[in-house]
Amino acid sequence: MARIPLMPVQDSMFLLAESREHPMHVGGLQLYSLPDDAGPDYLSQIYHSLVADEQSVQPLFRRRPRRPVSSLGQWSWASDYLLDMEYHVRLTALPRPGRVRELLELTSRLHGSLLDRHRPLWEFSLIEGLEGNRFATYSKVHHALMDGVSSLILASRALSTNPDDRDMPPVWAVPPMQRPDKPGGGPLELLENLRASATDIAGVLPALVRSANTALREQASVLPFQAPRSIFNVQITGARRFAAQRWPVDRVKAIRRATGATLNDVVLAMCSGALRRYLLELGALPDRPLISMVPVSLRAKQKRSEASGNSVGAILVNLGTHLEDPAQRFTQIQQSAQIAKRSLAELSPLQILALSGLTMAPLAFAPLPGFVRMTPPPFNLIISNVPGSPKPLYWNGAKLDGMYPLSIPYDGQALNITITSYADQLQFGLTGCRRNVPHLQRLLGHLDDSLAELEKAVL
């Protein structure tokens, strides 16, 4: 087997943290309209063509994790040249009547199962039987292999803006824009990586001091462990529930233009209002504001384009959920996000990753008995916004109607909200612990009410 470099520490953390209760993969649900000329065997033919073409699978999707003695216990990747394509690619059907409700139930079950570490860490399902002359695909890939931005990059490369393209390769056959793997992967490479990073790491402590000083000066700034305890900050099970819906991006852009905010500020305000309504309905709204961890992509800062690995920092944003007035909540969110972004502006990508790691570090201890119950949460939930294609896309003549991201709840973080843009829509994917986030689908209605409330307040 070919030897390739050691797995970066920020990637291997997702393997170290995984257990049956804590699957560490991200996913995507895509809805398609069948082409007008699609016959009854359209999906079956696509499935058989996918499983028959093992040779086209690119190296990224042949990687499986290993932990050899020569790496001093550090995770690395091995290349699997004996792929069982019928294991990785599945054809399934919805029970009648094939509504979106049944699709979301199936997706919830698929997203709750672990990926097999003895195989490359990805799966892809073709799902037929969806009403309205449609079908769906569900894919999942381990977070150690790629983050949400990376998976969206690859998914976009596997689609076309031309509906007449009928020979589109699957996502695992699209080569990523990346440097070739180098031979090696032993202790010397590990020591060299540590030496090269020493200068950047030396700047982490001063950056942390500056963040603390900013928090003391700026009322809207946030540090870890300022979050109140909420119903989301509990230990979770491995079962998942997924809810999804979309809204016209023009409605969000109108609020952005009227306020001078960013699109992500508006999305956070939309989530804030929905969370406030949801928790009030359950009689569980904390007196202090919820704090969201917001992932920040570092790919532009790093000038990287390869669609693999993890390149994500994190900021904390005050959601202002204790405020009844939507305009005041919006102002609180906007100020908090601006301060958090300014604190990262002068840092290197590695320093941002290190500081973000300190923010996320408590999650590594959350599975320990009593840790979540006895310690304050570092934040209340994760809200992520990943930009997608502004143009309509097609796969083998089938029009992509919607793409909904599925992410990772953690112990102490039972709810994750991830949003992506596609064409003229914002697509929301809500992933929650099936046991500890009751009536998850009600949050969709609250998101709609929250958007209307924002429009009334600022337009």
Image (cartoon, rainbow, N blue to C red):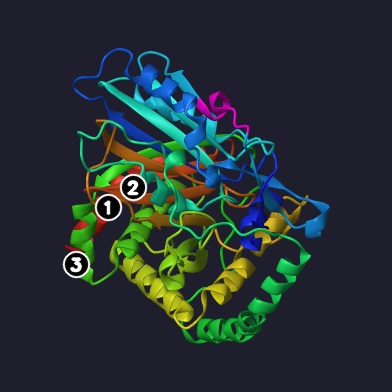
> Is 282 within the magenta?
no
The picture places residue 353, in percent across and down from the top left corner, at 57, 69
Kind of element beneath mark 3: helix
Q: Give the range drawn in magenta.
A: 82-89
The picture places residue 67, in percent across and down from the top left corner, at 76, 50
Q: In this view, does 120 lie above or below 380?
A: above
Which of 324/113 is in front? 113
What residue sits right under mark 3 in the picture?
A: 257
What residue sits right under mark 2 in the picture?
A: 447
Amino acid of disc 3? Arg
> In this rendering, would 234 be left or right of 381?
right
Asked whether disc 2 touches disc 1, contact meaning CB atoms under 8 Å apart, the reply is: yes
Which of 212/124 is in front? 124
Q: Is residue 381 above or below residue 256?
A: above
Amino acid of disc 2? Leu
Could you classify mark 3 by the number of other residues whose Cα lies within 10 Å: few (under 14), some (14-19), or many (20 or more)? few
The residue located at (48%, 80%) in the rendering is: 343
Could you classify mark 1 by the number of other residues whose Cα lies within 10 Å: few (under 14), some (14-19), or many (20 or more)? many
The residue located at (52%, 47%) in the rendering is: 415
The residue located at (25%, 58%) in the rendering is: 454
Asked whether disc 3 touches disc 2, contact meaning CB atoms under 8 Å apart, the reply is: no
**Numbered disc in front, either 3 or 2:** 3
Q: How far apart are marks 2 and 1 (CA)?
A: 6 Å
Image-quadrant location for residue 434:
top right
> Which dot marks residue 451?
1
Kind of element beneath mark 1: helix
Amino acid of disc 1? Leu
1 or 3: tag closer to the N-terminus = 3
The picture places residue 264, in percent across and down from the top left corner, at 34, 62
Q: Distance between the residues labelled 1 and 3?
A: 15 Å
Residue 124 seen from this side? yes
